Amino acid sequence: MSLYNKYRPNLFREIVSQEVTITAIKEQLKNDRFSQAYIMAGTRGTGKTTTSKLFSKYVTCESPSEGEPCDVCGSCIDAKAGRHSDIYEIDGASNNSVDHVRTLIDEIKYPPMRSKYKVYIIDEVHMLSGSAFNALLKTLEEPPAHVIFILATTELHKVPATIRSRCQIFTFAQIEVRDISAHLLKITNFENINLSEEGARLIAENTDGSMRDGISILEQLSHNALIDTQTVEKALGLINEKHTYSFVEFLIDRDIENAIAVYKEIMKQGKTTSQLIESMIRFLTGAIMCGDRVGEMSSTLKKLIEFKRNVQKESNIQLLFNLFIVDACTCTKVIDGALEDTLNKVDKRIYEIESFIKKVAKNKSDSSETPKTPAISDIKAEERPLNVKEVQEEMKQEPANDNKASVQNDNSELKKANSERVQSLLGRLNKFQAKV
């Protein structure tokens, strides 16, 4: 028996990381106020089918208690073994025609053999044809009192709205990395498998929130004396996290020599360019979520995703990726610090003078005598406005950046934004110069 089936939960409380959904289902069962049609929706390996099995196990149990099946009666044992006469599991992918549904409808009119209810679990229900859904519609709306339908799907949007409206829908979220990691370590304690915490975390990070995938990977690696990060990386074809981190940092810092050196090292290890791109996307996404250099990370991620989309049908991705590295290392940084400082400085000076003019205007309105408007030369140095020519000259000055080529290759969006800001500042200068 596979580890996944061996450690499939036998009780609701054993299901990992779906507390909200499971609590709602258990409350319905405890109060005997459950519906006759349900949809269990969510990504793969999150507990949809397991929950459906436990639901059917509970409603056919001889002595359920507090929302849990007893797990010891004959009915529970048969349900666990998959041989209960009143529980039907149907694969929607292979039984998707209207004839299959019509056969099912003909069968449901007969009462259950040994329990109060007959339960029909239709897995991957979104695979049913349009005609099959139409045939099922009336039965879902008014099923016999002894029948319960549980529809499981990974693609809820493909289930017609007419079907969804006749069912209670429970959504299963992707399982957290920490929960998958902890569960894998728990299994290894029973199976005497030597799994490190770092190895468990790396397995969990590469499951897309699927507990089933995590346990399957663990079983695949269980023959190793020690399952650590190196073992997982080798088995899954992953690139070392340190290499990915270094490569991304060198790209962002425009260090082309070191970026190419790390890239060559990754290729020497037998990895592919596609694997590196996927590793970079995972790293950049995680870095952005953690708030690490968000502007630069986001820009790099956007360019990388665009590159991936453009080269999907290309045969020589490695050559094109070499050009991507060169382009990434020679373009301007997302924010040019020197130019940003200059704009902030001018903005501050203009704000100070605008405040001064407002103060003068207020004094004029409050006094019967018209005060003399001070000349520009009378204003303190830090309050004096830059005139239009001064601002224009300051804008023309080359930012204090050793990488002149970087400045010259500024991206068009940044140029446009900076140009608009400069024009705004000059407009404000013209306004208050006329007043003063």
Image (spheres, rainbow, N blue to C red):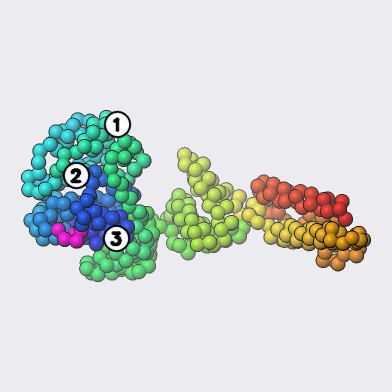
Dot 3, how many residues are within 10 Å of its Cα: few (below 14), some (14-19), or many (20+)?
A: some
Q: Which residue is mark 1?
A: 130
Whether residues under marks 3 and 1 lie with C-beta atoms below 8 angstroms apart, the answer is no
Q: Which residue is painted at 72% across and 51% down in the image?
A: 421
Q: Secondary structure at mark 3?
A: loop
- Mark 3 vs 1, N-terminal side: 3
Q: Secondary structure at mark 1?
A: helix
Q: Which residue is painted at 29% across and 38% down in the image?
A: 163
72 relative position to 171: left or right: left
The amino acid type, in three-letter code, at marker 1 is: Gly
- State the image coordinates of residue 174 (x, y, percent, origin top left): 36, 54
Measure how far apart labels 1 and 2 are at the Cα level: 22 Å
Q: Which residue is mark 2?
A: 148
Q: Nearer the viewer, mark 3 or mark 2?
A: 2
**Which region is colored magenta?**
64-68
Measure how far apart labels 3 and 1 are at the Cα level: 34 Å
Whether residues under marks 1 and 2 lie with C-beta atoms below 8 angstroms apart, the answer is no
- State the image coordinates of residue 142 (x, y, percent, origin top left): 21, 37
The amino acid type, in three-letter code, at marker 3 is: Val
